[in-house]
Image (spheres, rainbow, N blue to C red):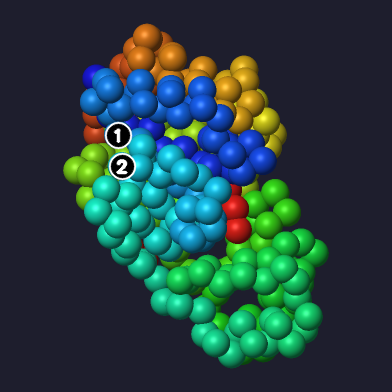
Amino acid sequence: MRFRALAADYDGTLAHGGIVAPSTCEALARLKQTGRKVVLVTGRELGDLKSVCRELEIFDRVVAENGAVVHNPADGGVRVLGEPPPPLFVERLAERGIEPLSTGRVIVATKEPHEAAVLDVIRDLGLELRIVFNKGAVMVLPAGISKASGLGVALEELDLAAHEVVGVGDAENDHAFMKSCGCAVAVANALPTLKEEADLVLESSNGAGIVELIRRLIEDEARLVPGRLENPAGASNGEASPAGPGARG
């Protein structure tokens, strides 16, 4: 078994309209029966995610808040990998009338076209924060926090290496974590730039794409990324070692 885990984005990848289809959950269960791990990697806040996804127990780890939080559904454990947003920063955003506006343990999120106002506040307060986009969502995080860094922590906990992981996503904030994986996959509804960088582009969208990917992974893993078969684990094939600690999607 070359690929020992699947790391998947939530909105637009596993889920459509915020909901994971029963057929997608069944496919994830089949994948786990092969001994592989499943990691959810999302920009959503953990509380928000729990309100829409009743199947969190199927995941071995949940990377939430775009890499700032790692959750173990089996024991309820939560690791926070970044500093909380400064209260003054959130107050200034609210004073500017920015809506919607939500705060998690680390992340602050709103929507376009508020990115200019958010950047003004970051600059005015002299904060080391960065803006991440995700199909209309605007997420603010500390420097160094990304889906890739959060996934790295999750993989360390699971005793997995990044080259053993298939990463699948659809949007701007999925670039880094997909690049860190041994195989980068884009669902059919992914942004064109993500498809261009992917090793494999699926024929189906959203959860149906995940079902397609899992079938291929179980039935014919060796042909998933033919161009990389000659590279042994640890060779120069675009892999990245798990990174340490440093909305939606």
Q: Is residue 229 above or below residue 80?
A: above
Contact between marks 1 and 2 (CB within 8 A): the answer is yes
The answer to whether 98 appears left or right of 69 in the picture is: right
Residue 129: where, in percent of width, then height? 55, 74
Residue 124 seen in render: yes
- The disc, 1 or 2, on the residue closer to the chain's N-terminal end is 1
Numbered tag placed on residue 60 in the rendering? 2
Residue 106: x and y in percent read 47, 71
Q: Image quadrant of residue 170?
A: top right
Choose between 204 and 227: the one closer to the eye.
204
How many numbered circles does the render carry? 2
Q: Nearer the viewer, residue 50 or 104?
A: 50
Q: Say if 94 sits above or below 14 in the image.
A: below
Q: Residue at x 58, y 23 (%)?
A: 208
**Residue 104 on image: x %, y %:** 51, 69
Residue drawn at x 30%, y 52% is 72
Q: Residue at x 32, y 50 (%)?
A: 73
Mark 2 is surrounded, within 10 Å at the Cα level, by few (under 14), some (14 to 19) or many (20 or more) other residues, namely many
Which secondary structure lies at badge 2? loop
**How far from the left and from the top, in percent, is residue 137?**
68, 57
Q: Can residue 242 be spotted in the picture? A: no
**Residue type, label 2:** Asp
Say which quarter of the image contains residue 238: top left
Residue 63, above or below 26: below
Q: Say few, some or many: other residues with alpha carbon within 10 Å of mark 1 (under 14 / 14 to 19 / 20 or more).
A: many
User: Circle 1 is placed at which residue position?
Assistant: 37
